[in-house]
Image (tube, rainbow, N blue to C red):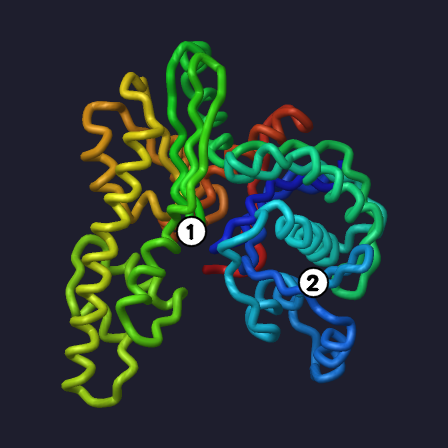
C-alpha cells in the first residue's frame, strides 16, 4: 500500500492523517473551503504568479469535467465561503483528491499509486457511503492535482459516522467489557452535531445542524459587519467569561466611545446566543439520548466550548473527553493547541483503526504538514 489516509473533511478544517510505505504517520491539514472554477480563471491565476507556493497552499484538482480550488487557494484567491449546506461527501471528493495529490507531490511519489482511505461523515450522510465510494473511486482513477496527473487505485475504502474513531479508541481501551455497554458518542463540530449510539455493539444515530455556526449566525444577526472566522476565534477565547473587553478587537468603529458601546453590544449578543445555543443542544440531547447510558464519549472542537454545560447535563453519567486520546494526539504530532488536539481525536482513532487492519504492528509518528490553525 503506497498511501493510507484518514480523512475528516470538516467544515472548519480538513483533517488528514496519513502513512506511507516508510511506516511513519503524519498530519496534513488544509483550510476547508472548496471553489468550483472555470479553466480560464485558473489559467489567469497561474499566469499572474511570480513563483509557486507550496502545493498545499495552492491546491487545485481536475477530474472528469470538474475543476476545483481547495483549501487556502479557494479561500484567499477565489473567495470561497464555508459550506453550511449541501452534502458533505460531495465536497469531500475534491478534498481527498487534493490531500492525495499534495501529499504525493511533497513526498515525490509516482503518478500511479495504491490507496486506502477511511473517511468520516455526519451520521445522517452515512447512508450515502456507497455513492461516496463510487464517485471517489471514479475520480481517483484519473485526476490532475497542481499540474500533475495521477492514477490512483482505491484498494481499501471505509466510511464511518463521525465519532467512530472515538468509539474505536474507547473499545480498545476497555476490551470485551465495552461490547456490553450502552455508549453515546457525541460530536459537536462547526456545522453539525452528531450522535452515534452503540448499544451492546448495535449502532444507531442522528445528526442535526447545531454546530458552532448556529451560535455564530445568531451573534451576527444582532451585530454589524462581523466576519464569522474572527468572531469564532474571539468567542472561543472568551469562553464562559463573556465581557466587553474580550471583543474589543472585533469593533469596526474608529471612535473610542463608539468602540466601547460596540464591544458591549457584541458581548451581550454572544451571551444571549450562547444561552440560546445551549438550550437548543439540550433539547436535542433530551430527545435523542437514552437515560440509561453507561458512558458518553465527547468530541469535536465545539464540545470544549460547552464543557461545563455538558458536564452538568449528563450529571453522573461517566464522560470520556476525546476518548482519552487527546494527549496521544498532542505527543504524536507535537501540537501545542489543545483545541486542535480535541478536533483531531476522532480522525486519529479512525487512522489507528485502518492502520491496524492494513499494517499490523506499531506505528511511527512524524511531523505535521500543511496548514496550521
For image coordinates 16% across by 71% down, the residue present is 264
Q: Please state which of residues 172 and 74 is positioned toward the viewer in this rendering.
A: 74
For image coordinates 47% across by 55% down, the residue present is 12
For image coordinates 81% across by 59% down, the residue present is 65
Residue 303 found in image quarter? top left
> Residue 343 placed where, x, y %?
43, 45
Mark 2 vs mark 1, CA separation in Å? 22 Å
* Above or below for 87 versus 217: above
Circle 2 residue: 68
Residue 2 found in image quarter? top right
Circle 1 residue: 190
Q: Is residue 370 left or right of residue 275?
A: right
For image coordinates 41% across by 38% down, the residue present is 187
Q: Is residue 144 left or right of residue 4?
A: right
Residue 21 found in image quarter? top right
> Residue 355 placed where, x, y %?
62, 31
Q: Is residue 87 visible?
A: yes
Amino acid at each position: 500500500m503506497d498511501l493510507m489516509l484518514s480523512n475528516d473533511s470538516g467544515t472548519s478544517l480538513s483533517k488528514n492523517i496519513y502513512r506511507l510505505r516508510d511506516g511513519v504517520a503524519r498530519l496534513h491539514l488544509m483550510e476547508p473551503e472548496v471553489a468550483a472554477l472555470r479553466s480560464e480563471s485558473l489559467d489567469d491565476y497561474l499566469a499572474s504568479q511570480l513563483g509557486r507556493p507550496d502545493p498545499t497552499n495552492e491546491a487545485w484538482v481536475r477530474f472528469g469535467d470538474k475543476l476545483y480550488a481547495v483549501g487556502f487557494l479557494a479561500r484567499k484567491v477565489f473567495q470561497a465561503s464555508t459550506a453550511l449546506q449541501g452534502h458533505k461527501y460531495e465536497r469531500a471528493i475534491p478534498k481527498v483528491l487534493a490531500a492525495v495529490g499534495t501529499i504525493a507531490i511533497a513526498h515525490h511519489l509516482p503518478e500511479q499509486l495504491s490507496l486506502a482511505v477511511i473517511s468520516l461523515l455526519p451520521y445522517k450522510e452515512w447512508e450515502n457511503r456507497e455513492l461516496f465510494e463510487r464517485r471517489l473511486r471514479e475520480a481517483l482513477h484519473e485526476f490532475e492535482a497542481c499540474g500533475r496527473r495521477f492514477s490512483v487505485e482505491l484498494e481499501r475504502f471505509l466510511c464511518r459516522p463521525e465519532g467512530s474513531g472515538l468509539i474505536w479508541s474507547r473499545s480498545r481501551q476497555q476490551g470485551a467489557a465495552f461490547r456490553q455497554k450502552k455508549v453515546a458518542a457525541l460530536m459537536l463540530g462547526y456545522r453539525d452535531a452528531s450522535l452515534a449510539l452503540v448499544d451492546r455493539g448495535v449502532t444507531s444515530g442522528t445528526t442535526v445542524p447545531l454546530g458552532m455556526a448556529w451560535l455564530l449566525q445568531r451573534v451576527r444577526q444582532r451585530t454589524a459587519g462581523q466576519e464569522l472566522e474572527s468572531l469564532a476565534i474571539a468567542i472561543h477565547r472568551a469562553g464562559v467569561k463573556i465581557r466587553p473587553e474580550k471583543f474589543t478587537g472585533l469593533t469596526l468603529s474608529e471612535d473610542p466611545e463608539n468602540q466601547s458601546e460596540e464591544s458591549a453590544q457584541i458581548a451581550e449578543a454572544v451571551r444571549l446566543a450562547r444561552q440560546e445555543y445551549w438550550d437548543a443542544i439540550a433539547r436535542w440531547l433530551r430527545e435523542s439520548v437514552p437515560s440509561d447510558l453507561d458512558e458518553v464519549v465527547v468530541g469535536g472542537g465545539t464540545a470544549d466550548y460547552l464543557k461545563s454545560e455538558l458536564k452538568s447535563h449528563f450529571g453522573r453519567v461517566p464522560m470520556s473527553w476525546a476518548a482519552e486520546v487527546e494527549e496521544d494526539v498532542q505527543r504524536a504530532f507535537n501540537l501545542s493547541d489543545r483545541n486542535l488536539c480535541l478536533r483531531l481525536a476522532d480522525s486519529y482513532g479512525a487512522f489507528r483503526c485502518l492502520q491496524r487492519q492494513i499494517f499490523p504492528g506499531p506505528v511511527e509518528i512524524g511531523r505535521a504538514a500543511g496548514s496550521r490553525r
